[in-house]
Image (cartoon, rainbow, N blue to C red):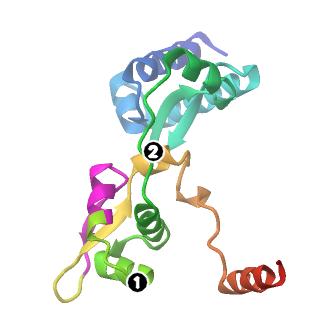
Amino acid sequence: MNNEEGNLKGRIEAILFVAGEAVPVKELARALQTGEKEVREAIDSLKDEYDYEQRGFLLKRFGDHVQLATRPLYSGDVVRLLQPVQQQSLSQAAMETLAVVAYKQPVTRAEVEQIRGVKCDYSLQSLMLKGLIREAGRKDTIGRPILFCTTDEFLSHFGLEDLNGLPPMPQPEDAEKKEDMEELIP
């Protein structure tokens, strides 16, 4: 490791530590007056070092954002010290709505309602207020309905680097097999 690379990694580490939240790689490069490629390489190197040394923190990626976070292995210690207020969880309706948006995005309210079979205005509004979804433009059809998609906050909330990290959707035959198995089990 050369001095310049170590210096860049230290500078990235300092910014992420102070920011406390996910920072776009583009903004890191701008602040550090260097190229995005160099920043990405330094981030990869830091991530590898933190993982190899099992440091108390790790680097998480959410889309094109990066953040320092507590390593789950040590989170119990932090919780015992800080005893944080419990985060309010998402309702079943909000989770179902969020799942439809995540897998079908960009998607309109009407399309979400068609899939869920119920109105979802409140769930969509709640998810937008929580920053988990956002407007992604308008569909080029009659009425120009709003299209919704997930945000980087969604990725962060669920610990995903990108949407490829979503679990595969269950196939209809898998659901039928599960129902058949449930009928067999007393």
Earlier residue among tags 2 and 1 = 2
Residue visible at 65% across and 85% down in the picture: 172
In the rendered image, which residue does mark 1 sit on?
A: 117
Q: 172 or 3, which is in the foreground?
A: 172
Dot 2 alpha-carbon crowd within 10 angstroms: few under 14, some 14 to 19, many 20 or more: some
Q: Is residue 126 left or right of residue 10?
A: left
Magenta stretch encompasses residue 159: no
Using the image, determine if residue 149 lies above or below residue 144: above
Outermost front residue? 186
Residue visible at 46% across and 63% down in the picture: 92
x and y percent of residue 99 in the render? 48, 66
Q: Which residues make up the magenta segment?
A: 123-139
x and y percent of residue 161 in the render? 55, 47
Residue visible at 46% across and 25% down in the picture: 84
Q: Is residue 172 left or right of residue 163?
A: right
Dot 1 alpha-carbon crowd within 10 angstroms: few under 14, some 14 to 19, many 20 or more: few
Residue visible at 67% across and 81% down in the picture: 171
Quarter-wise, where is residue 9 in the image?
Answer: top right
- Dot 2 falls on a residue whose secondary structure is loop
Mark drawn on residue 64: 2
Magenta stretch encompasses residue 125: yes
C-alpha gap between disc 2 and disc 1: 34 Å
x and y percent of residue 160 in the render? 55, 49
Q: 3 or 49, which is in the foreground?
A: 49
